[in-house]
Image (cartoon, rainbow, N blue to C red):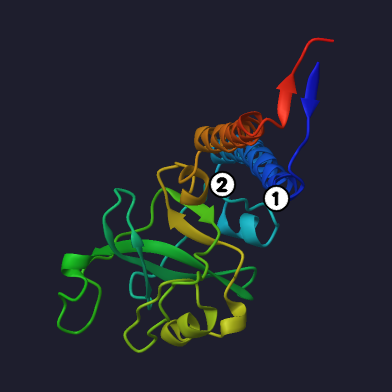
Amino acid sequence: MARFRPYPVLTLLMLPALALLLWLGSWQLDRRAWKVELLAQYAATADAPPITVSEGVCQGLAETGRRAIEPDVDAAARIVRVSGRNTQGAPGWRLFTAVRVCDGQERVLVETGFEGLQTATRADDGAPAVLAQADALRFETPLGTGVFTPPSDVEANMFYAFDPVGMSRVLEVEAETLNTQYWLAKSTGEPPAYLTQTPPERHLAYAITWFAMTLALLAVYFAYHIQAGRLTWRGA
């Protein structure tokens, strides 16, 4: 028969910590299930037939990862430069221009080329060193602003996130006409970084870690009481 006399203060401190560890483990399991579902949805969308920009934006058929038929792009159109990486992972400037859709009432940014960092300022007149026609385009959510995102430099045409006001000045279009929900980006069809940086397997590993810490906390708690003689066993 066990006889247990818990330390009141220690127990009051241990219970919230125990609850927190259990919640963190459960949260990571929920995150894993959510990520698995998102990856499955993205895979289904990525395999769907391509649609036109107008069908995606004007008819509401666009989804992140959906392939788009290459629109007509004016090679002489003004561009904006967005910091990022190309499909091979090299750092530099992604080049976007605006394409009219919905009877000219909206404009969608379309990625048309890439400037590697070593060639970003090669042209004497400031023109892009590389300007390639768009291919393998997919609808993507424009790059958002984070806590550490540098501010846009409109004069130098250097953007680090989607900035409709600043970009409209460079493109010489009305800011309210730029579509803020999607842009067309070159893509290999791989899931975006926010889905792959922490894959489901890593969420599972995190959950196991939190649950293991829960067991370790309980082991230390009861071992301390056993050592102090406050948890004993004796015959009935």
Q: Which residue carries the number 2 mark?
A: 66
Q: Is disc 1 surrounded by few (<14), some (14 to 19) or many (20+) residues within 10 Å?
A: few
Residue at image location 46% in from the left, 50% down from the top: 193
Quadrant containing the N terminus is top right
Q: Amino acid at mark 2?
A: Arg
Residue at image location 17% in from the left, 68% down from the top: 119
Q: In the orientation shown, which residue stands out farthest toward the top?
A: 235
Q: Is disc 2 surrounded by few (<14), some (14 to 19) or many (20+) residues within 10 Å?
A: many
Secondary structure, mark 2, is loop
38 or 157: which is nearer to us?
38
Q: Position of residue 122 (x, y in %)?
A: 15, 74
Please identify the quarter of the rendering in which residue 129 is found.
Answer: bottom left
In the rendered structure, the answer to whether residue 60 lies left or right of residue 44 reads: right
Residue at image location 51% in from the left, 51% down from the top: 194
234 or 86: which is nearer to us?
234
Determine whether 18 is above or below 125 in the image. Answer: above
Q: Position of residue 51 (x, y in %)?
A: 58, 48
Between circles 1 and 2, the one closer to the viewer is 1
Q: Amino acid at mark 1?
A: Leu
Identify the mark nearer the N-term, 1 or 2. Answer: 1
Q: Tag on residue 13? A: 1
Please identify the quarter of the rendering in which residue 125 is found.
Answer: bottom left
